[in-house]
Amino acid sequence: MGWKTPKFEYVNGYKIVEVDGPAFKVYDGDSQLGEHFPYSGEAAAYANSLPKRDHQRD
């Protein structure tokens, strides 16, 4: 009953995934970049600070 589908979005070509906590993680493919961010806006700002990459969906 506690299972939840993770929400995600793409910012600057990086995938931002919401996990329980709530916390937000930034991924480049399968590799996590940075740390856990408490707000989606912080994760998006971090993704925007990285070099732009092509939009890839896994």
Image: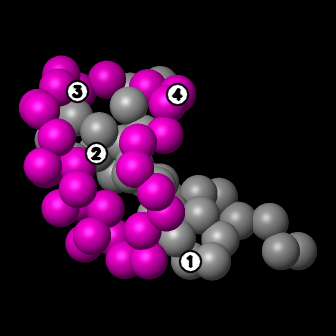
Q: Quadrant of residue 5?
A: bottom right
The picture places residue 50, in percent across and down from the top left corner, at 16, 40
**Which quarter shows the N terminus?**
bottom right
Indicate which label's residue lies in the foreground, 1 or 3. Answer: 1
Range of magenta residues: 29-56
Q: Is residue 13 magenta?
A: no
Q: Which residue is mark 4?
A: 30
Gap in angstroms between the C-alphas marked 3 and 4: 14 Å
The residue identified by callout 2 is 10
Distance (Cα) linking label 1 and label 2: 18 Å
Q: Secondary structure at mark 4?
A: loop
Q: Earlier in the sequence, mark 3 or mark 2?
A: 2
Residue denoted by label 3:
55
Disc 4 residue type (three-letter): Asp
Quick one: label 1 or label 2, which is nearer the N terminus? 2
Mark in the foreground, 1 or 2: 1
Give the structural element (helix, strand or loop) at label 1. Answer: loop
**What residue is rendered at 59% in x and 57% in y?**
6
Spatial separation of the CA atoms under disc 1 and disc 4: 20 Å
- Mark 2 and mark 3 in contact (Cβ < 8 Å)? yes
Which residue shows up at 12% across the image and 49% down it? 49
Other residues around mark 4 within 10 Å, as few (<14) / some (14–19) / many (≥20): few
